[in-house]
Amino acid sequence: MAAELINLRRARKQRERQQAADKAAENRALHGKTKSEKERETIERGKVERLFEQGRRERDEQ
């Protein structure tokens, strides 16, 4: 009846990876945007840029 050997370095790294993954999931839930929100934001940004560009005057290149 031998005890199961545990590599402490691997166990520590695995625990740290799991903690990082949990924190990432929490941050995604708090700060993340859904795909539709991202698409809507991209469309709005494009509209604003087009309106801005339409209002610009062209310079006479000499």
Image (tube, helix red, strand yellow):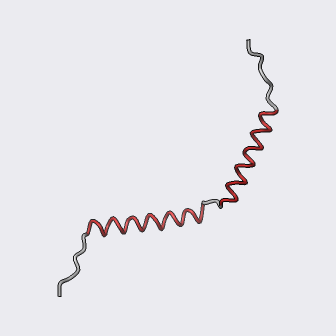
Q: Is 59 located above or below residue 2 in the figure?
A: above
Q: How many marks?
A: 0
Q: Residue at x 23, y 80 (%)?
A: 4
Q: Residue at x 27, y 65 (%)?
A: 9
Q: Quadrant of the C terminus?
A: top right
Foreground of the two, 12 or 49: 49
Foreground of the two, 54 or 12: 54
Q: Is 42 located above or below residue 25 in the figure?
A: above
Q: Judge left or right: residue 57 versus residue 15.
A: right
Q: Judge left or right: residue 21 versus residue 62.
A: left
Based on the displayed image, in which of its 4 quarters is residue 36 positioned?
bottom right
Of all residues shown, which one is farthest toward the left? Answer: 1
Based on the displayed image, in which of its 4 quarters is residue 14 positioned?
bottom left
Image coordinates of residue 24 in percent, x first then y, are: 50, 63
Based on the displayed image, in which of its 4 quarters is residue 32 positioned?
bottom right
Of all residues shown, which one is farthest toward the top? Answer: 62
Q: Quadrant of the N terminus?
A: bottom left
Image coordinates of residue 54 in percent, x first then y, are: 81, 33
Image coordinates of residue 50 in percent, x first then y, are: 77, 38
Q: Residue at x 48, y 68 (%)?
A: 22
Q: Judge left or right: residue 8 versus residue 21.
A: left
Q: Is 45 located above or below residue 62 in the figure?
A: below
Image coordinates of residue 25 in percent, x first then y, are: 52, 66
